[in-house]
Image (spheres, rainbow, N blue to C red):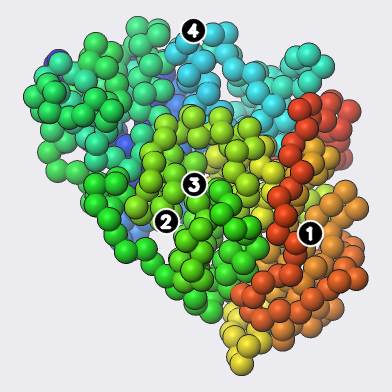
Amino acid sequence: MRVVSAREAAALVPDGATIAVSGGSYRAVPESLLEAIEARFVDERRPEGCTVVALSMLERSRKGRGGEGSGLNRLAHRGLMSRLVVSSFSRNRESALNRFAQSDEVAAYNYPMGTILQWLRASAAGRRGVWTEVGVGTFVDPRLGGGCVGPGATVPLNRLETVGGTEMLFYPSLTVDVALVKATAADERGNLYLQREAYDHGVWDVAAAARRTRGLVIAEVNEVVEVGTVHPRMGGVPGPVVDAVVVREEPWEDEQDPTLTGAARGIPPARLGKSPRELIAQSAVRLLPERSMVNLGAGLPMYDVPSAARALGRDDLYFTVEQGPMGGWPQVGGATLNPELLLGQLEVFDFYEGGGPDVSVLAFGQIDRHGNVNVSRFGDMMPGCGGFVNIVHGARWLVFCGTLTTGGLAESVIGGTLSIDEEGRTPRFVNEVEQITFNGRRGIAAGQRVTVVTERATFEVTERGFSLESVVAGVDFQKDILARIPFPVEVSPTLTFVEPGGAPGLAAAAATPRPAVPPGPETLEVPEGRERRRGGH
């Protein structure tokens, strides 16, 4: 095993390299390596013209100022990157990477997290590439943008093919020249261990892809240990695959919380608050069948649903998140308090795409009259899709959560009723979403159940359209709901009125499983004006 400094490691990266990077949020991220590459480029203008492939933004949370200057923001320099492939960007529209991706200085692409993992694994296995039905009919479909982000990206990296009569997206195999990974420790033979990491987030996948094409694998670790001192089940990458190791003795802030890795137990939060998102979380929890396995997506579901479930005594629920933790209580950033199992992320996405969980609870940014959902792009605000496209592809029952409007919305609970003190400036229910992250028509035609939970009402979405199923007490469903939605909504003959955060009154039955053969090519309708334009938006 070769131990080098971060600066020496950065000097190993050649011009024009395809660099694959592990990690998500601020976990399993080789931050010191990214920092060193940036410093070298600032000093020497090298490496230049690189392609960077990462699972997600890799942006570290910092008190008061988000993740500025961290993660992939470090590589957002003109000349350093020529191409970027990532599943998510920053929620801060002013982040360096977001601004860079929307310029003509780089060809930037947004593809689903699980698909990037599968793409790397197919490349590692020496296959021609990966074929997948995930994303057909969404913004990653070449007919709807092909995942192109800004004016620098004019040609999608995937293409539409028909395999056995079914439309699929094909991603040709990658050549990875350099893999940058993060582990807890390396032993004296170079084996990498993840014993204090909350999840692996592609560590093995990017390393294996580089190994296949005889690229370099460079690891950042917190310590070097003797062989045999860490249980082999904690291993992430075998020693012969690793070319160089950089030791950063101190982990980054909050990176290795033992209650998130299973090394210690913590006390789960339990709160029944009265903010709009907390009320939505409570209503969503009350929908969930007993002992169900529930996938939680980023945002409100991951941050508010576990706390509400705990407060409501729903210890019977089994939560899972795309990063790999199973059981326990999901927290900010995809880590889980008191996880019961930690699975590889690729395996989790395979499980999700096959419809493994009973219910998927996800946030929505926009939803339209067709049942299409947008979480990935809103004008110049570009969070990206993350693993959302993979999750919704196979989900049996989708529960989408969000406020009816946003932007200045102010609401309060008074005596068991909801008062809308100030209406939001921006509607979330629209005629046409800006970007299709979930294709409602395809999903419903494939047998998926779709429920939408807001702070004022709950809806079911079927092939007939939207049906208003329950209304929160204190809300005028004509003025405060139907008048705020620009398309027809049926009022259910069994409409119920509930307290804020109360049970919506829907039958909590599992959705019809997805059919073995999903809808064919004839089911995709490309709305007028939605053909791919320059920049994919």
List the residue tagged with mark 1: 460
List the residue tagged with mark 4: 126
Distance of mark 1 from mark 4, alpha carbons? 44 Å
Distance of mark 3 from mark 4, alpha carbons? 31 Å
Mark 4 vs 2, N-terminal side = 4
Q: Is residue 357 visible?
A: yes
Distance of mark 4 from mark 2, alpha carbons? 38 Å
Q: What is the three-letter code of the residue carrying label 4?
A: Gly
List the residue tagged with mark 3: 320
The answer to whether the residue labelled 3 contacts the one labelled 4, judged by CB atoms less than 8 Å apart, is no
Q: What is the three-letter code of the residue carrying label 1?
A: Glu
x and y percent of residue 462 in the render?
84, 52
Q: Secondary structure at mark 3?
A: strand
Q: Is residue 145 left or right of residue 309?
A: right
Residue nearest the viewer, comparing 524 with 48: 524
Q: What is the three-letter code of the residue carrying label 2?
A: Trp
Q: Nearer the viewer, mark 3 or mark 4?
A: 3
Q: Is residue 417 left or right of residue 516?
A: left
Mark 3 vs 4, N-terminal side = 4
